[in-house]
Amino acid sequence: MSNRPLLGAVMLKVVLQVALVYVPFLQGIFGTQALPGPALALTIALSSAIFWAVELEKRLKIYLDIRHSISNR
C-alpha cells in the first residue's frame, strides 16, 4: 500500500462503480439495476476467491520456508 496514487485511483473506481449501480439517477442513464443482497454477497465471495487463494498460498510458502530454515540449522 505504498503507492498512494494507485490506491486513490482504485478507491475512486470502486466509488464510481457503486454509484452507477445504486444511484437512481445514474441507474436510469446507464440502464443498471442493483443486485439483491444475497446475489451481491455471492458475487463478492466468488470474485474474491482467487485473491484469498493467493494470500493463503503466500502464507503457506512463508510458513514452509521458515520451517525448512529451522530444520536445516
Image (tube, rainbow, N blue to C red):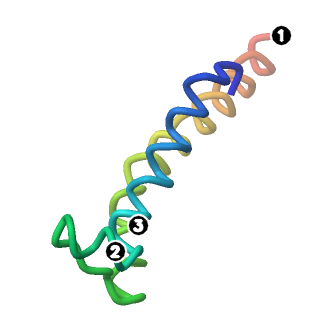
Which of the image's four quarters has the C terminus? top right
2 vs 3, front mark:
2
Disc with the residue nearer the chain's start (1 vs 2): 2
Is 73 or 16 nearer to us in this picture?
16
Q: Secondary structure at mark 1?
A: loop
Categorize mark 3 by other alpha carbons within 10 Å: few (<14), some (14-19), many (20+). few
Q: Please provide percent x and percent y for residue 22.
A: 40, 75
Which of the image's four quarters has the N terminus? top right
Q: Residue at x 19, y 64 (%)?
A: 30
Q: Residue at x 41, y 68 (%)?
A: 45
Which residue was labeled with disc 2? 25
Which amino acid, mark 3? Ile
Mark linked to residue 44: 3
- Rendering quarter of residue 28: bottom left
Q: Please provide percent x and percent y for residue 11.
A: 56, 44
Mark linked to residue 50: none
Which residue was labeled with disc 1? 73
Q: Please provide percent x and percent y for residue 70.
A: 81, 20
Which amino acid, mark 2? Phe
Q: CA distance from mark 2 to mark 3?
A: 24 Å
